[in-house]
Image (cartoon, rainbow, N blue to C red):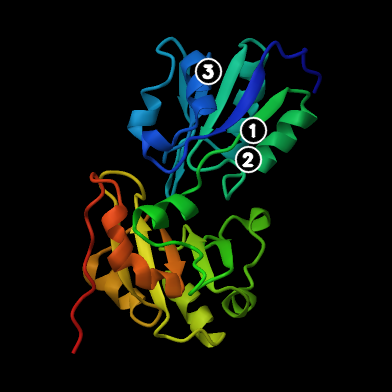
Amino acid sequence: MTRSTPVGKVYLVGAGPGDPGLLTVKAKTLLEGADVVLYDALVSPPILDFINPQAIRVHAGKRRGRHSLLQEDTTRLLIEYAQSHAVVVRLKGGDPFVFGRGGEEMEDLIEAGVPVEVVPGVTSGIAAPAYAGIPLTHRHYSSSVTFVTGHESVGKYRPKVNWEAIARGSETIVIYMGVRNLPQIVAQLLAAGKPPETPMALVRWGTRPDQEELVGTLGSIVSQVEETGFEAPAVAVIGNTVKLHQNLAVGRPESISLTIESPTRH
């Protein structure tokens, strides 16, 4: 299909994990001057408030069972809006290139001849544990960290995760979108030799005022989720640095204070 020369440019912008204070200066500037913004479901309302009031807003979010737009439709709209608008922002939660399909969108835009630029954002896999007082590395506990998706249901876009290699090869594991498949993930990590007493935490709505945390072990976390009703969206952290949660959580922002306690076991 032949397209006219675009008059504008598409910016793949990372909105960060939720706290508007973690939005980059460049991202905020682009939102304030945007002509069009296509935004995801997990972008927090305070960040949406930065959008130019005159801008066209399109909700392109994808949540389980509630897809506003198909991926193909989102890319098509980005291409079309770039034909008639100078600044088109594709606003994504976290970082566009970390489990955000930003690389795929950039490929499609370049193929269509549309100028495109990525603006990195703070990813939830780093920010959510930090706000929970969990460092991902620590010289006494961990010198390696692996980021992995826990959601593998989208066919060609999700190569199968080698959980055995991850269990054996990394001291800290951070899992995105893993709550739904948590029982299967935990079972595979245990089968690969990860000790059941390995500390583990789930952090929901990381960096937002309603952040929730569930802290336990690899062997207990599935039953804790069932008992407390803990739900997605959340990131999981597995490894000995989770032990520092209780001491380091005092350094969290004052607005983040809600923790779900582990059930008492006899």
Farthest right residue?
2
Q: Which element is circle 1 on?
A: strand
Q: Which residue is drawn at 52% across and 79% down?
A: 189
Q: Which element is circle 2 on?
A: helix
Check whether the beta carbons of the residues at disc 2 and disc 1 lie within 8 A of each other: yes
- Nearer the N terminus, badge 3 or badge 1? 3
Mark 2: amino acid = Gly
- Residue 118 bears which disc, if any? 1
Q: Position of residue 215 (x, y in %)?
A: 31, 69
Q: In which quadrant is the C terminus drawn?
A: bottom left
Q: Which element is circle 3 on?
A: strand
Locate residue 169 relative to residue 238 in the image: left or right: right
Location of mark 3 (residue): 36
Mark 3: amino acid = Val
Q: Position of residue 79 (x, y in %)?
A: 67, 23
- Nearer the N terminus, badge 2 or badge 3? 3
Residue 181 is at least partly visible in this image = no
- Residue 102 bears which disc, if any? 2
Mark 1: amino acid = Val
**88 up-or-down from 103: above or below:** above
Q: Where is residue 88 in the image (x, y as percent from the top left)?
A: 58, 20
Q: Position of residue 86 (x, y in %)?
A: 62, 11
Farthest bottom residue?
266
- Nearer the N terminus, badge 2 or badge 1? 2
